[in-house]
Amino acid sequence: MSDVNEVRAVLGAHGGVATTAQLAALGVTPVQLRSLLAADVLVRIRRSSFVDGARWREASHWDRHELRARAVALVLCAPASPYALSHHSALAVLGIGVYDVDDRVHLVRTDGRRGRSGKVVHVHPPVLPRWVAERDGIPVVVPELACLQVGVASGVVSGLVSADSALRVGATDPPGLERARPCIVGPRSPRADVILEHATGLSDSGGETRCRWIMHTVGLPAPELQVPVRDKAGDLVGIVDFLFREHWTIVEFDGALKYSGRVDLVAEKRREDRLRELGYEIVRITWSDLAQPERVLAKIRAAFSRARVRRRPVA
């Protein structure tokens, strides 16, 4: 049997994925392939698509989708093929954030024909070739169209998280999203209009985007985003996620990832103390809060009330 190191070398050269044809070129027989699968050296994604077993086991859920998409693309999106990755499969390869999407690999055709969908692959209505670019040799739908596709297929919040991410990293811009809008048709296409209205690129994470959407859906006034707050001397105290200026309330999404150790925690505590000294109420929203919009609303309304009491003139 071909040395396992050779198999791993092929996987490494193709981003952790390989095809049956590539393995056969190493001399791997069907019987040996079954042994590699049984030993978890390989994980089968589709008939002729495989991923590195070690990378698969270590990967997060969203990184697994990228591996899955790359494995399928290596077979279906070969040179001269009419297929391209679309929706969140394209975004995963492009390094753009996704949220609450399914695990199937999403594709479109560029030759005007429709393809067949299955348990692993979902082929959508075709798009014109001008909406397809390449990343690492893989044809992918351009990010602005992929974001709107996600919104239509998986919901406004999913599309908004991806659109904010794409805008934040400079993968597209608002005019780009507008240009992609006519490509989105069907009974759920109004979702694309909502995404265009609310995408800003000012959220530092998907959690912040989701938090902002909750504020909108529960009827809170629109906050200012990523606002520099300065003290009376003009020194910067911090850039806050959300500012309700009229209500003297700051809302921060606490994803916990921003704190790498005790030093960061102490610095954040001092920053928060300085903001309170300036007269602001501080609300922290966590990942668990996002699952309960009524809790987010209650926290922020309580802060508004505290701010009114603190700033009420003394008779």
Image (tube, helix red, strand yellow):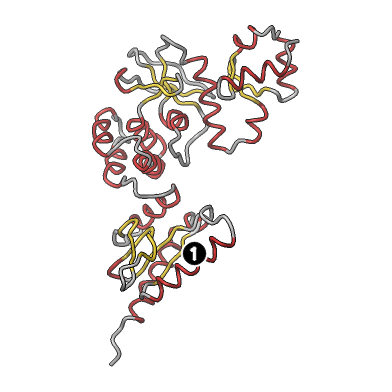
Callout 1 secondary element: helix
Task: Say above or below: 272 vs 77.
Answer: below
Picture coordinates of residue 150, whole percent (x, y) = 39, 35
Picture coordinates of residue 248, whole percent (x, y) = 33, 71
Can you say which quadrant of the picture contains the N terminus?
A: top right
Q: Toward which corner of the image does residue 219 lie, by quadrant?
A: bottom left
Picture coordinates of residue 13, whole percent (x, y) = 58, 20
Query: Which residue is more in the foreground, 280 or 125?
Result: 280
Picture coordinates of residue 252, whole percent (x, y) = 43, 61
User: Circle 1 sits on which residue?
Assistant: 268
Specify the farthest residue to the bottom.
Answer: 315
Please indicate whether residue 313 sits to the left or right of residue 25 in the image: left
Can you say which quadrant of the picture contains the C terminus?
A: bottom left
Residue found at x 43% / y 58%: 293
Query: Which residue is more in the foreground, 100 or 177?
Result: 177
Please indicate whether residue 106 sits to the left or right of residue 176 in the image: right
Query: Which residue is more in the foreground, 42 or 16?
Result: 16
Task: Say above or below: 209 vs 18.
Answer: below
Q: Amino acid at mark 1?
A: Glu
Q: Toward which corner of the image does residue 110 lie, by quadrant?
A: top left
Residue found at x 31% / y 42%: 195
Query: Badge 1, how many Cα within 10 Å: few under 14, some, many 20+?
Result: some
Task: Say above or below: 290 vs 230.
Answer: above
The total of numbered circles placed on residues is 1
